[in-house]
Image (tube, rainbow, N blue to C red):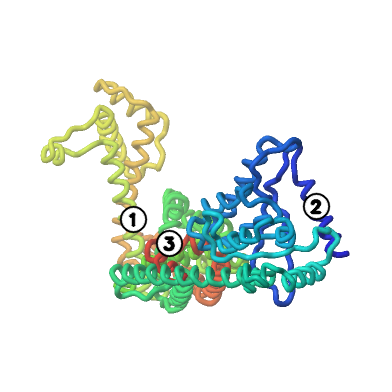
Amino acid sequence: KQLAALRNEIEIRMRNSVKEGCTVSTETISLSVKGPGLQRMVLVDLPGVISTVTSGMAPDTKETIFSISKAYMQNPNAIILCIQDGSVDAERSIVTDLVSQMDPQGKRTIFVLTKVDLAEKNVASPSRIQQIIEGKLFPMKALGYFAVVTGKGNSSESIESIKEYEEEFFQNSKLLKTCMLKAHQVTTKNLSLAVSDCFWKMVRESVEQQADAFKATRFNLETEWKNNYPRLRELDRNELFEKAKNEILDEVISLTQVTPKHWEEILQKTLWERVSTHVIENIYLPAAQTMNSGTFNTTVDIKLKQWTDKQLPNKAVEVAWETLQEEFSRFMTEQKGKEHDDIFDKLKQAVKEESIKRHKWNERAEDSLRVIQHNALEDRSISDKQQWDAAIHFMEETLQSRLKDTESVIEDMVGPDWKKRWLYWIGRTKEQNIRNETKNELEKLIKCNEEHAAYLANDEVTTVRKNLEARGITVDPCLIKDTWHQIYRRYFLKTALNHCNLCRRGFYYYQRHFVDSELECNDIVLFWRIQRMLAITANTLRQQLTNTEVRRLDENVKEVLEDFAEDNEKKVKLLTGKRVQLAEDLSK
């Protein structure tokens, strides 16, 4: 019943798979059969090869069947069961021609003659069956020739009844009794054993061939490795990743070995580079324009408070975060002499970028830092001469750097001086000549009034313009103001440096609050306050870095490495090159 139901289901699917206007279909109906003692193989039941298209068939039926059959038979690992119906004349069959084309040597073909019971009854000459089974009738080679009986032709027969009928027939067959057929060439059981033997023989030969091919390939790969990488171990992509992972973790640990002094020096230097322009332009210069020390200090205090409340803490945290990134990058990218392996560079870069991307600075850092910076800037008490001299040195360095930049800007504006023009045979452009004449007029103004304010009055601009026009030079008022800004800036910086030099002996007067002294050094005190704030900020940020942020960055790196370890696509993308591919091939 089950077999009949199965046969019925297959027939329904076969009919459904055939499209309208077609006789056969290329669609496969798969059936899995499992059970003890069954061989593991795939059996493909192809449509029977026909020589003529009859009425009711699609015109291309013959070609379609041939095409389907060839597609499967061309597979070099396929065993071809060439089925010949014993109840019809062998000469009418064309299947043997097709098989001969696909397997000329017969190394994977087994010939099967079916319906031998009908052939024995109907064939006038039994010797023809003998010729077929001995492979003498067809010009086709095969590994073996078998005769089978597949039941009485009743579709409702069970498998057991088919087996019993076959055994009974061959026990009584005249073909066996007269030795026209040999016992090992008959029954479906012997056929299945022969197919199994053929199958495992082909598997063994295939495995041996592949093994030989693998040996040859491995020898070639090993030779290539020895010639190209004689001092390196064969590490595949996963092994290389593990090695890189350990290196990266070691490099992160190196961050904890950075000395406090190194951290603080970098932080202090970088922070001052970021805020120096603001201090000079928005705090020191406006305060220095005031008339007396009281106004100077008031202006400084107000502007320092505004700066500390809004910009300074944020800028400091920004500098600390960038410093951590730079130090992390330095450890990750610096070459370690002969031990450096550039095959990890892309991976390290990706880990570095992803770890930094995931890292978030402690949000409460700014609030605590704001209080510390405010308290540091409130302190005006310089305790000893050494601190006083350090503040003077800091101020001198800052002003000299600004003066150098200003001199460079003025030179670009007015062109080369007479010495450079004479030595290098270069001249001034028309605009530079105008700028130079304007500069000379403005310098006269400062010479006449050394206490001049930072900005030109409108009548002074008009006077300069008319003086230049009297000499045939037309100047725009904006150009005069622009040139004045740089000329006055240079004058101011030079004056401040001279004052700074005078204040070298001012510590004694500072201790007496400049009582009975014409010397006032409030600008030195300002730079001391800034210098002290920078030192305290650098110390605070260093503690936060070493106590918290480095550890959190280390956790991020470990997370990223774990994610990358599970992402094969990422590893393939980041660990590339001939060496990796060669090691991968060797590993396979």
Q: Earlier in the sequence, mark 1 or mark 2?
A: 2
Residue at mark 2: 11
Q: Secondary structure at mark 3?
A: loop
Residue at mark 1: 399
Q: Please tell me the numbered disc located at residue 576.
A: 3
Residue 536 visible at all: no
Nearer-the-camera pick, 450 or 402: 402
Could you say where residue 180 lies in the image, as x and y percent from the top left? Answer: 62, 67
The residue under label 2 is which amino acid type? Glu
Picture residue at 70% right of the left edge, 77% below the top: 37
The vertical placement of 13 against 246, above or below, is above
Image mark count: 3
Q: Secondary structure at mark 1?
A: helix
The residue under label 1 is which amino acid type? Leu
Nearer-the-camera pick, 518 or 442: 442
Residue 458 appears in which quarter of the rendering?
A: top left
Left or right of residue 205, residue 155 in this image: right
